[in-house]
Amino acid sequence: MTKLKISPKDLLTTLKRPLVHDGMTFIASDTAKAQVFSMMATKIAGYFDDQVDVVTCPESSSTMAWELAEAVAAKLGGVPVVLDITRKKKGAEVEIDPDEWDEWVATVRKKGKDDAYIASTRKKAESLVKRWRKGGIPATKDVPHEIRKFLMLHTAGGSIDQVWGKRVLVIDDNVDKAETLRSIHKALRKAGASDVHLAAGWDYSQRKEQ
């Protein structure tokens, strides 16, 4: 028997689209997808019973986040799922958030990073912002993690008024460094959500506490 070395990230990919690995194509069946979504949704819902008024998910090129949000909402007793509460910023809207920048600088200094590293990172960020202002939408996956922290690539969407005074649960299909959920959390709190919970079906970092 040959063992295939497939990473957790690749395994998750089969729930979104076919995975080609070592010349072979892997496709998750509809039954397998339903079982995985059900297990994920059951576990997530178990943490937030009677603590949620609205469920939402990030704007994404994948339908998995939306499907998982629907499954979680159903297990929470039919809590409404509202899309377009937040959205990805357009190129012209992206800027370096001064508060997030200061926080990032303080964090990397504690980790021993010098002024040259900080200046270089700032230059990269400014170059990206300048390019995006000429048009186009930032692709989150193509932005270095350290830069995402202070660009805050998500903002309020057309349905943001539906979170005022509400307890909101944001469901993503997966989380790595958590910059997407972090920027959404900030946008929802700014919009008046009374509480914001964050959850994902798959955590690449294997963190036990968020």
Image (tube, grey):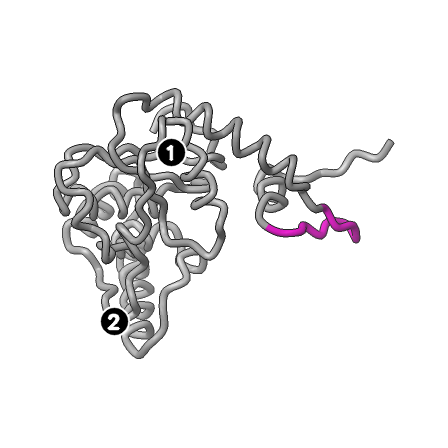
Q: Amino acid at mark 2?
A: Ala
Magenta residues span: 17-26
| CA neighbours of label 2 inside 10 A, class few (<14), some (14 to 19), many (20+) | some
Specify which label sits upstream in the sequence, 2 or 1: 1
Q: Is residue 135 above or below residue 42?
A: below
* Horizontal and vertical percent position of residue 124: 33, 64
Q: Is residue 10 above or below residue 124?
A: above
Q: Amino acid at mark 1?
A: Ala
Residue 19, magenta (yes or no): yes
* Mark 2–mark 1 CB contact (< 8 Å): no
User: Circle 2 is placed at which residue position?
Assistant: 92
Q: Quadrant of the C terminus?
A: top left
- Residue positioned 42% across, 36% down in the render: 200
Q: Nearer the viewer, residue 175 or 168?
A: 168
Q: Quadrant of the N terminus?
A: top right
Left or right of 197 on screen, residue 36? right
**Number of the front mark, 2 or 1:** 1
Left or right of 82 on screen, residue 60? right
Q: Nearer the viewer, residue 22 or 80?
A: 80
Query: For numbered disc 1, what is the local secondary structure?
Result: helix
Query: For numbered disc 2, what is the local secondary structure?
Result: helix
Give the spatial CA distance, label 2 vs label 1: 34 Å
What is the chief secondary structure element of the magenta stretch? strand
